[in-house]
Amino acid sequence: MDYIDILQEMLRYIDANIKEKMSIEKLAARAGFSPYHFCRVFQWGVGYSVMEYVRNRRLFYAASELAGGKKVIDIAVDYGFETHSGFSKAFRRYFGCSPEKYREHASFDVPKLPILKKTKQYVKGGIVMEPIMVKKEAIKLAGFAIKTKTINGDNSREIPEFWQEYLTDGRCKKLHEESFLKSHVEYGACFSESIEHEEFEYVIGVEVKEGCIVPNDYRVYTIPEAIYAVFTTPPADGAGFVSSIQGTWNFIHSEWFSSSGYEYANGKVDFELYDERCMEKTGKVIDIYIPVEKIT
């Protein structure tokens, strides 16, 4: 059995015992490694430290239970968090919102297990966790846009360039000083113009407060209500951050859809969500929202 197979078995074991006490020593012994070697191998194969991965999986399972009426503190204790504040802090850091806020859109879906041999080939240095399912109401955005296309990979080059220009030419600063701003969370949304020619508008925008008037300096768009599969990109630093985002998109289209039982929801909008987690010095992540519907 090679290392990837051993690690895959360890991921299955962690899921099967997700509410039990775990330690690096216990997991390493089950894998047949010394703790030091296990930590190194796990980081290489999974892209997360051992206990970081365990914590994230527990958060995923906890998120799936928020759709019910169970108290947040009871869910937290079930998954090894001693206090409400400790659970909320970890939850916000991973999902970008509080457990109470997430509960408004939560589903009962239990997170599927990552398949290392599939995900590892798309994102260097980490794996793509299986998505969570959420429902979100319509979102009004104001911001800036470019037209691009998927032909010849134009979007993979032009969108990062667009972000770089936006961040350095004064538009970002100006947008975040506007009074209509609901929060500083940024959206990177794809509004399809021509399916036949694979053209779309990519929008960098912020959510608009209800009832506010947006100056003509900005483009205004509405992301319609939808059910989303939400993927969190693997933690990355520096130039690896862009590769992590693009690798996650590649995994979604090349692997996830084919075995998920879902397809793109007609007429809906996919988007990237950039919150405080992408401002970290290390371990930057974003969420990718894919509007989906069950294949009938």
Image: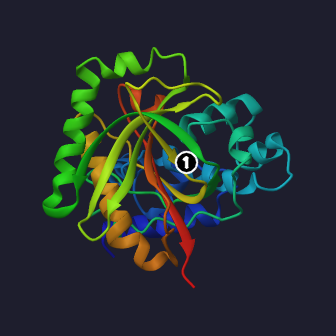
Residue under pointer 1: 56
Neighbour tally class for label 1: few under 14, some 14-19, many 20 plus, Cα within 10 Å = some
Which quarter of the figure has residue 15?
bottom right
Specify whether 2 is left or right of 184.
left
Which quarter of the figure has residue 150?
bottom left
Determine whether the residue tagged by mark 1 lies in a helix, strand or loop: helix
- Identify the residue shown where x is 47% and y is 48%: 50
Which of the pair 296/15 is nearer the observer?
296
Picture layout, residue 184 above or below residue 75 = above
Picture layout, residue 291 above or below residue 148 = below
Is residue 227 in sight in this rendering?
yes
- Identify the residue shown where x is 69% and y is 53%: 106
Q: Quadrant of the C terminus?
A: bottom right
Specify whether 231 is left or right of 209.
left
The picture places residue 234, in percent across and down from the top left corner, at 38, 48
Which of the pair 277/120 is nearer the observer?
277
The picture places residue 85, in percent across and down from the top left corner, at 72, 28
- Residue furthest to the bottom: 296
The picture places residue 177, in percent across and down from the top left corner, at 45, 14
The picture places residue 185, in percent across and down from the top left corner, at 49, 31
- Identify the residue shown where x is 75% and y is 43%: 76
Is residue 83 in sight in this rendering?
no
Which of the pair 30/178 is nearer the observer?
178
- Identify the residue shown where x is 80% and y is 42%: 72
Picture layout, residue 54 above or below residue 197 = above
